Image (cartoon, coloured by chain):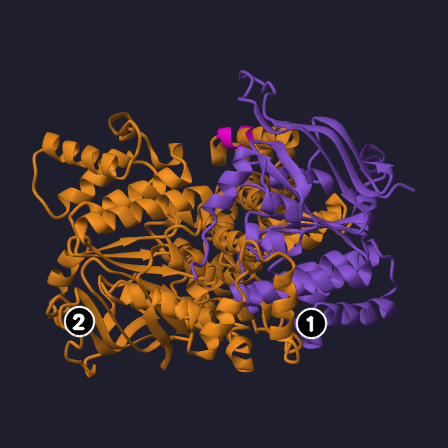
Chain colours: A purple, B orange
Amino acid sequence: MSDNAIRVRDLTKTFGGKTQLFGRASHEVRALTKVSVDLKQGETLAVVGESGSGKSTLARILVGLETPTSGTIEIAGQSADDLRKQGPKAFGRTVQYVFQETVASLNPRKTIAQILETPLSLLAGHAAPERKSRMRELMQAVDMPEDALDRYPHEMSGGQAQRMAIARALAAEPDILILDEPVSALDVSVQAQVLLLLQRLKDELGLSYLFISHDLAVVEAIADRVAVMHFGEIVELEEAGRLFREPVHPYTQKLLQSAPRIAR
Amino acid sequence: MTDSFADLSSPPRASRMSPLRLLVQSRLAAAGLLLLIAIGLVILLAPVLPLSDPNATAPAERLLRPLTEGHLLGTDQLGRDILSRLIWGSRVSIAVGFAATLFAALIGSGIGLISGYAGGRTDNMLMRGIDMLMAFPYILLALAIVAALGPGLMNALYAIAVVNIPFFARNVRGVTLGLAHREFVDAARLSGKGHLSILATEILPNVLPVIVITMSTTAGWMILETAGLSFLGLGAQPPQADLGSMLGEGRAQLFTAPHVSIVPGVMIFLIVISLNLVGDGIRDALDPRLKSGALGRPGPITAIATDRRAHEKSQAGAVLSIEGLDTGFRMGSQYVPAVRNVSLSVMPGECLGLIGESGSGKSVTALSVMGLVASPPGLIRNGSIHLGNEDVLSMPESRLIACRGQRVAYIFQDPLTTLHPTYTIGQQVAEAIAAHQSLGRSELWDRAIALLEKVQIPDARARAEHYPHQLSGGQRQRVGIAMALANDPEVIIADEPTTALDVTVQADILRLLKALQRERQMALLFITHDFGVVSEICDRVAVMKDGEIVETGTTRTVLNRPQHAYTKRLIACVPEIGEGRRFLHRVADLFDGQSEKDGAA
């Protein structure tokens, strides 16, 4: 048993570059270049960077929605290739993903109960009566009233939808959560509450987080370590306190200088 | 204090009209529905109605005129009762038309779903097959199929169904293609669902409205086609009656006994028109834009209540001052306020920040200034908006429109949606100048380039030839700023201009705005939700909550010594760089007790 929840080595991902039936090869875009990073058991690793830096591609590969071009990934000691061969359920039981576009990640024609039903039965393997009680527990865990189960996604505010997305991810009972900009679309007061919620869930359930964000202040509040991405590469990977005190890479320094601050 | 956060929470459950009510609300659709129900009842009751045998010939009673004793609609060339044949014939035609619709919908939608979901090679092969089907002239293909299978009603049904499959396949594929890459499909995959299950339970429910709409709009068409094939003698075989064959048989007597062909002709017309009216009604009822109540095109300016309470200008010297503004939305007979009694003023060369959380009414306030809140449903109920010494809300419509861009200009959040995708940025900046100044072409172009240089777009002359999608987000926002500057406005209203940008780009844009504002002594109304941004650029700040301004003051005072409890909490919720973990402890105390238990957020 390794103490790494996720171990990534030399991960490279390119898009395009394939020859079409009658066409020439399409333009090749490199989204990730030789990314190596470990997510330790029980830690919160933040990945920061600007749009197009490859943060979301990394996340989508780690949950199995994209396949890497080259490189190796181990999730909870198992090779991702093996997991992929075992089918869509194998990934879902260990890693879950909380999408950036929360509202879009909830099917508009289903109630929350119907949405939670799927991972509870397919991934956690609960029988029908158990599912009901698990749903109530999940609502409690994300601080939502039970009657929210009967609501449709469009009947919720951004913060409520985010809690539901977290509840769905937790329903699979994973060890690792990949959080893709989980608070960036929320108002500050709601953002603070969701951050508190994430911290509490992590302590209670012993989760490991990969926390993707572009907001450095948020990252500093929640992360143990921070990886800075720039054009598909990790340019700096450091313990959070140290990175914010003494940024080494010029790009990290620029990011820190650009963040708007409240002048006192 | 608790409620200040709780009531930001759930948006009101909008009372939307049910599709059925919308359908009935459209008079034409309701008339079509009534007609269809009447026809449906008659043909369903055909076996119990006191009708004579539709196939019983009576040579002695040939070609009787309508309204003859015992034959309400007369008889045909073989002495058969036309009323009876009409009802039984409609039964056949409608049954065949509906069966063909169902058949085509089932197979066509199946192909469309698979094609759109699988994509790649499968999509390519299926769609090329559909293309081949569509490459044949429509009726010729149906004829060829019937010719191959032999004439008969069932074969006509197959032919019509096959010919209509492409219609469903293409429509459904288009919608599926858009849905297949949506996040909720990915989410379902991560929840352990297989492809078939995703198609059936995640995508199909979202595609169903499209299938229903397509069915309702094609059913009438299919009945017409059935009649067409029968008319040519390829569908219903004698003596069986259907509308098409009745029409065909009556053709020979068109001049001597026109009623024999006119009666089934009118029936076809009635069935098809009622189906089409209902189909249009269903389409409108299922269209989400109509459901939301935004039925009409918005007027050129926001509606202003005639009994509006106007106010005197309160702040001498202000370029823009708003006094007691009430703006809201009319929902049916109700008025829902969005902004209540808002007063603020901006001095020349000053930057006023308007800050608040989503739904607090910041944007409605900003859009009210130039009457840009869409009406219907928007309504300015009370208040005055003074631009210089003139009340904007008392201006004639044409004068208010002339002020837009010339005296007050806007910069919006996402320049990708506000810039026109098929014009070059140079053209768009030039157009913004030309809207208020008449200049020669080359002079216009030079001015546009100068503006682009002003907002620091490198190599502006070459860049002017580029289209919006060829620019980065930051550069697009620079173009948005250039367009706002085009006519040297007195006031610029910037609505979250940097929210969509990366932090490094945001810093550049803020610097640019600040420099331009200083140089031109413009008044800037800056709308944002970010206290950091306010701190960087604003001289004064007004805090909005639930449509009201709760606090106004210099930026330094509001940030350091906020007076209102809401402002205090809002500022306390902002994490700051250098604070680290302490932030979570700090806000944990803040939310302790009330916490998140009330399901706020």
Q: What separation in Å lies between label 2 and label 1 (alpha carbons)?
A: 46 Å
Image location (x, y in percent) of residue B465: 28, 28
Three-letter amino acid code at disc 1? Answer: Asp
Res A19 visible: yes
Dividing the image into 4 quarters, which one contains the C terminus of chain B?
bottom right
Q: Residue at x 32, y 41 (%)?
A: B478
Crowdedness of circle 2 by 10 Å Cα count: few (<14), some, many (20+)?
A: many
Q: Are marks 2 and 1 in contact (CB under 8 Å)?
A: no
Between marks 2 and 1 in the image, the one whose residue lies nearer the viewer: 1
Q: Which residue is mark 2?
A: B393
Image location (x, y in percent) of residue A256: 51, 45
User: Which of the chains bears the disc numbered 2?
Assistant: B
| Image-based side of B456 in relation to B387, left or right | right
Establish if A31 lies above or below A263.
above
| Image-based side of B582 in relation to B421, left or right | right
Q: Which of B369 and B371 lies nearest the eye of the viewer?
A: B369
| Same chain letter for marks 2 and 1 | no
Image location (x, y in percent) of residue B518: 22, 51
| Image-based side of A124 in relation to B258, left or right | right
Q: Which residue is mark 1?
A: A143
Image location (x, y in percent) of residue A177: 73, 51
Question: For the magenta stretch, what is the residue range?
Answer: B132-136
Q: Residue at x 17, y 80 (%)?
A: B311
Res B104 visible: no
User: Which of the chains bears the disc numbered 1?
Assistant: A
